[in-house]
């Protein structure tokens, strides 16, 4: 049974889903194949991904392939109630609402996994963790699952290392058609979309501190530069630090960067990246936000303890006045700013990420995985890239037999 906020919101949700569908040609082509082949006939899929329009379209594509869909969100702030309502009207089971309390959020995941899924699709690992900790008896039935993001992949690897993982998982995040585009270009654009629509402030001429120069950090830094900011990067990995320098950014420790930034964006997947010692150094009016998986990168609890005054400055912006008289502003409670304060990555990006999800789920059912941790098969990655190129109207060259032979030979003859 569904558990959503308000079914009357469905018309707005249908409109949002129709808009993204128009910009997701790769997934549309997969939908046609699923409708014809019914790969998920008789199968239950439990899915936990940010419940907004692009995710809803993925759910509809899987349902078109015969799946019974049980859907929840992967973050209390990114669920959109109108989209949830539209899916329920389309006959899917949805348990989620915007701004759920931590207890409600957990309870929505619990209601979703209790369907006894054959396949799970997760973003960050909360759904898989819940199945293992609270429904161990349901794990046996699970054919396998797919994980959407970097942090979820890390958690699964830890579970596997401890011998705890009970069914095979596919690391969707690690597919090239995922992280090269979603983490880099998707996060790069949607983080600035979230910051700009929340603050409505100029970025040009400001100093932006990007914490973490992984795939997401590269995108956020690149787009900050494009908007005219001076960009500082902080890192803990010496190789990534050199990469940032060669890409034209300044690199320094967080304590030093703290005094210089106008905007701070954390994208590390780590914890305690910006803490009390850093807040003390910051300029009056500094803006802090996070785009990494959990809300532990900026120590918002520590900031609350230090503050002599706290007030809501604007929707999704909370101001904290420090004993030194300076105000710091935190966006979206330190949760992912692009999803909690925006619509997340653009449709064309999620088209590729979710095409990998859909084809990986099909692969699990039809081929079956033999190991617990599985990479996305190379042919799926290439299939998605070729479809995307086709829809971009772009052709590429093919190796001639002589070129192929040249590349494979080791002899000088
Ligand atoms: P990544 O592993 O490629 O990069 C993380 C980087 O952070 C690494 O270079 C690492 O050395 C660095 N780092 C770790 N701890 C640090 C610290 N204390 N200080 C400075 N740097 C530190 O990962 P990624 O793919 O860029 O993902 C980063 C996070 O963003 C993950 O939590 C991931 O789940 C999340 N993510 C968010 C979105 C989004 O839409 N907001 C999209 C994709 C991924
Ligand atoms: N589950 C985490 C968040 C991980 S966010 C949480 O607790 O907040 C990172 C993932 O969100 C990325 O891997 C990306 O693929 C996904 N994402 C980004 N924009 C999205 C969108 N518009 N719709 C659905 N998922 C999105």
Image: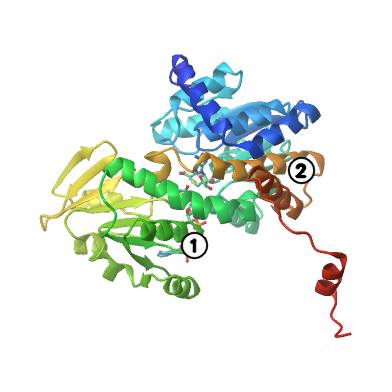
Whether label 1 lies within 8 Å of ligand 1 gets the answer yes
Q: Disc 2 vs disc 1: Cβ atoms closer than 8 Å?
A: no
**Residue pointed to by mark 1:** 214
Q: Nearer the viewer, residue 164 or 303?
A: 303
Image location (x, y in percent) of residue 309:
14, 45
Q: Which mark is residue 363?
A: 2
Q: Indicate the colouring scheme.
A: rainbow
From the viewer's perspective, is 398 left or right of 401? left
Is residue 209 something one can see in this rendering?
A: yes
Helix, strand or loop at mark 2: helix
Between disc 2 and disc 1, whose residue precedes? 1
Image location (x, y in percent) of residue 286:
23, 55
Corner quadrant of residue 62: top right
Q: Nearer the viewer, residue 390 or 42?
A: 390
From the viewer's perspective, is 178 left or right of 375? left
Taking the spot 80% from the left edge, 30% from the top edge, the residue there is 37
Circle 1: is it few (<14), some (14-19), or many (20+) Cα within 10 Å?
A: many
On the rendered image, what quadrant is the N terminus found in? top right
Taking the spot 48% from the left edge, 17% from the top edge, the residue there is 11
On the rendered image, what quadrant is the C terminus found in? bottom right
Rendered position, 394 above or below 366: below
């Amino acid at each position: 049974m569904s558990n959503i906020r308000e079914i009357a919101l469905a018309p707005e949700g249908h409109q949002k889903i129709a808009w993204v569908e128009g910009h997701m040609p790769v997934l549309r082509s997969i939908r046609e194949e699923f409708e014809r082949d019914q790969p998920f006939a008789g199968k239950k899929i439990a899915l936990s991904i940010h419940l907004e329009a692009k995710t809803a379209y993925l759910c509809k594509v899987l349902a078109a392939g015969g799946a019974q869909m049980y859907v929840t969100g992967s973050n209390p702030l990114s669920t959109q109630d109108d989209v949830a309502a539209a899916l329920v009207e389309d006959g899917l089971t949805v348990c989620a609402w915007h701004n759920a309390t931590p207890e409600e959020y957990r309870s929505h995941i619990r209601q979703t996994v209790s369907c006894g899924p054959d396949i799970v699709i997760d973003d960050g690992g909360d759904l898989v963790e819940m199945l293992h900790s609270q429904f161990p008896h349901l794990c046996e039935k699970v054919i396998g699952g797919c994980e959407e993001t970097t942090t979820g992949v890390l958690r699964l690897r830890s579970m596997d290392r401890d011998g705890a993982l009970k069914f095979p998982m596919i690391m969707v995040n690690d597919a090239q058609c995922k992280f090269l585009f979603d983490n880099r270009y998707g996060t790069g654009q949607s983080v600035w979309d979230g910051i700009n629509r929340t603050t409505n402030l100029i970025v040009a001429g400001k100093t932006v501190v990007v914490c973490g120069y992984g795939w997401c950090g590269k995108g956020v830094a690149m787009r900050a530069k494009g908007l005219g900011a001076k960009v500082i990067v902080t890192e803990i990995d010496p190789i990534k630090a050199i990469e940032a320098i060669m890409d034209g950014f300044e690199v320094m420790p967080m304590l030093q960067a703290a005094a210089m930034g106008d905007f701070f964006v954390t994208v590390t997947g780590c914890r305690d990246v910006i803490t009390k010692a850093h807040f003390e150094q910051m300029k009056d009016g500094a803006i802090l936000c996070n785009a990494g998986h959990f809300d532990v990168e900026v120590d918002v609890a520590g900031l609350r303890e230090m503050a002599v005054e706290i007030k809501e400055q604007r929707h999704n912006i909370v101001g904290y006045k420090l004993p030194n008289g300076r105000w710091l502003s935190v966006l979206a409670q330190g949760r992912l700013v692009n999803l909690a304060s925006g619509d997340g990555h653009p449709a064309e990006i999620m088209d590729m990420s979710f095409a990998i999800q859909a084809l990986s789920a099909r692969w699990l059912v039809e081929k079956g995985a033999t190991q617990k941790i599985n990479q996305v098969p190379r042919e799926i990655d290439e299939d998605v890239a070729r479809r995307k190129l086709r829809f971009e109207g772009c052709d590429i060259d093919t190796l001639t037999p002589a070129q192929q032979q040249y590349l494979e030979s080791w002899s000088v003859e």
